[in-house]
Image: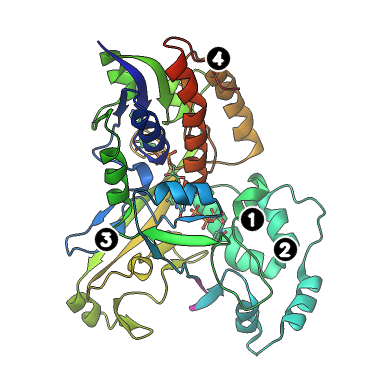
Amino acid sequence: MQSIDVLIAGAGFSGLVVAQRLSEAGLKCVIVERRSHLGGNAYDKPDKNGVLYHCYGPHYFRTNSKAVRDYLSRFTEWQPADYRVKSRTHGKYWSFPVNLATFEQLTGRPATEEEFIAWLETERVPCAHPANSEEVILASAGRTFYELFFQGYTLKQWARHPRELDASVCSRIPIRTARDDHYLREEFQALPAEGFTRLFERMSEASPNLEIHLNTDFLTGRHRWQPRHTVFTGPVDAYFNYAHGHLPYRSLRFEVESLTADDLRAQKRGAVSGSPGHWQPALQVNYPNDEEFTRIVEIKHATGQQTPHTNIVREYPLPADAAHEPYYPIPAPDTRAQYEKYRTAAAQEKNTSFIGRLATYHYFNMDQVVALAMKEADRLLPMLLADPVAVPCPE
Ligand code: FAD
Ligand code: UDP
């Protein structure tokens, strides 16, 4: 058994950020990652034609945090990204998220913002404090758009009615009355210029006291190390051997299709807004009603890679189980109550931190887990440097 300072389970954003910051300060860190690669769900790689794609669904980096942006900028340049999405239903592409252009498509005539606001007033179902995802969309966009774009998509994605999900789920999507179809709200929106995987490699290269063991499960392999502190970023229920039952997570099946320039020609696809080598008219097309998949992503629209080939990825939702990775915690009152038992157990676990999307059962974006991992490293660092034995548990 090897004595080390910190053993970290998981080489996603959460694990890598903590490891990078602690090892840079001189602490001996080991990451064990059960997959064969760095980066967790943000991992990307080239397909057989050399076209980069996001292997576990699209990862649109965005943040309002200068600290997060400055930190990650140590390891990457940025490619500004214009994340544009359409929704496809009733046989056409709709401007999405809901905005003035969507209203014009609905009515079939040009409109002003004032007309749209007046129409919304008649459509909206007033609700002072929306308590779930149905109420929040009915209150902001009204029933027509709720039924067109949200109800079916949400049922597919979560296998739950929007009424049984926190308001925070559907309110991730903006509703606007102006002619503004940006998908996201954050002020900084960009992708790592050479991809996420290169960013993760640079983070590990900048960590002189860090050892990484891929293809290694923490739960079965941890006995090889004797750490002073442990950071766990995997599913919290697995850590406690499901003592309080299995937490429900949603999973996805990704269907990747690589298309050469010849394939695109044969399918009579190819040029979008004068830019060659594209399959669909936007980065992401959502399918709320008509298909088994929820969305098709053609990431080349955002990476800006110069190539005549492309790829598309379809996402089919399903429950997480032994054969399907947990990707999404399910934000809802009943799942939160179940998680609460694990949160209590985690808080009592000696010399162990639980961080990240799976270990805290929270629907975090990348910048949020980076910020929280930076904070946890800042909390641990003085204690580990000052006291060779004890680190109190976080609250
Ligand atoms: P993860 O990335 O899940 O990493 C956890 C790691 O721990 C994994 O590599 C896993 O293999 C490993 N692990 C688990 N158990 C063990 C074990 N027992 N032993 C060893 N290793 C273990 N965020 C955005 O900001 N923008 C987006 O557009 C966006 N899109 C997304 C799309 C999809 C389909 C998904 C699923 C997520 C998306 N996210 C997005 C969220 C983003 O993926 C997360 O915020 C971020 O990757 C979480 O990092 P993490 O390190 O906490 O978890
Ligand atoms: N959503 C929807 N229709 C859409 C897009 C999103 O109903 O066309 C709802 C759905 O419940 C989804 C949630 O809004 O899970 C958040 O969407 P987002 O695009 O942020 O999902 P993510 O990229 O995190 O999977």
Along the viewing direction, whichever of 216 and 379 lies nearer the viewer = 379
- Residues tagged 1 and 2 counted as in contact (Cβ below 8 A): yes
Q: What span is in magenta? A: 86-92
Percent position of residue 324, x then y: 36, 40
Which corner quadrant of the image does residue 334 belong to?
A: top right
| Residue drawn at (33%, 60%) of the image | 193
**What is the CA distance from the residue labelled 1 to the residue labelled 2?**
9 Å
N-terminal of the pair, mark 3 or mark 4, is: 3
- Residues tagged 3 and 4 counted as in contact (Cβ below 8 A): no
Q: Given this view, does label 3 or label 2 mark the residue nearer the observer? A: 3
> Tag 4: Cα neighbours inside 10 Å, few (<14), some, or many (≥20)?
some
> Tag 1: Cα neighbours inside 10 Å, few (<14), some, or many (≥20)?
some
The residue type indicated by label 1 comes to Ser
Which corner quadrant of the image does residue 45 belong to?
A: bottom left
Residue that label 4 marks:
348
Which structural element holds mark 2? helix
**What is the CA distance from the residue labelled 1 to the residue labelled 3?**
30 Å
Q: Given this view, does label 4 or label 2 mark the residue nearer the observer? A: 4
| Residue drawn at (27%, 36%) of the image | 35
The residue type indicated by label 4 comes to Gln
Residue that label 3 marks:
52
Residue at disc 2, CB closer than 8 Å to ligand 2? no
Residue that label 1 marks:
171
Give the label on residue 140, or none.
2
Report the quarter where the N terminus lies.
top left
N-terminal of the pair, mark 1 or mark 3, is: 3
